[in-house]
Image (cartoon, rainbow, N blue to C red):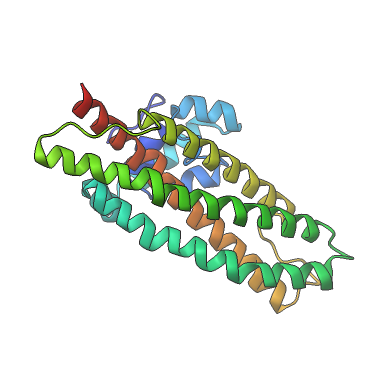
Amino acid sequence: MEITTNTNVGQLVAANYKTADVFKKYGVDFCCGGNISITQAAEKFGAPVTALLQDLEKVSTREDMESVLLQKLPLDALIDHIVEQHHAFVRENVESIPPYLAKLADVHGGNHPELIEVEKLFTQAAAALTRHIEEEEQILFPYIKELVKAKAKGEAPVRKGFGTIANPIASMHDDHDAEGERFRSISALTKGYTLPEDGCNTYRVGLAKLEAFENDLHRHIHLENNILFPKALDLEKKLVN
């Protein structure tokens, strides 16, 4: 894939997820804010466009086979992958992380009051993401699978109460944006999940779990925003028109 200043960020990461590390390096949101060009992204996030392009071209010389395979997955199989890998990860960690954060806020909150805000933000994220993935699994994902079946049978899809699929997808995008912003705040409060000098082992583990959660969330949102949702919108358009 040729990379220019007009290359779409989300499409580039979808083609080769190795480029995600470059965007992270320069503070560019490739999942929630991925539907813009490299030039627009550089301007929005204050990244040096020439250096950004050079680094992207360097990593893009190595093909990412996982990205190739994910792009080729049928939409129903991609949904199963998201649910089994990323939704399961969210469900497990919204239960396992809070006890660490509560203990850190209790023990270290005096010297590090930011931990109290981190605990509050993650509690909000846990509730919002739990609701979000349930809505996807109960409303949006089943409809996308119906679209796949309709295509296989050569039939028009049955219309739903939400109208076009663009409506629930827009709601999911809003949720993704909110969580992206929330975790940018958590990362800033923890100085990029950096252990302070007085941090104990529990502090280290808690930060590591938060960072792993954000990294998985980036991949999770990327798969939906940059691969699943655009293909689902295109599929519905072809079946309805």
Q: In this view, does 71 lie to the left or right of 48?
A: left
Identify which residue is drawn at 66% across, 69% down: 206
Compared to residue 146, the image places residue 4 above or below, namely above
Whether residue 1 is visible here, answered yes or no, is yes
View extreme (top): residue: 241
Compare residues 45 and 146 and report the one nearer the observer: 146
Q: In which quarter of the image is the C terminus?
A: top left
Residue 169 is drawn in which quadrant?
top left
Instruction: Left or right? Give the position of 26 relative to 124.
Output: left
From the viewer's perspective, is residue 7 above or below residue 197?
above
Q: Is residue 241 left or right of residue 165?
A: left
Please tell me which residue is depicted at 26% across the width and 31% down the height of the picture. Answer: 236
Q: In this view, does 7 lie above or below 28?
A: above
Identify the residue shown where x is 61% and y is 62%.
210
Q: In which quarter of the image is residue 27?
A: top right
* Residue 149 image offset from top left, x and y in percent: 17, 44
Image quarter for residue 57? top left
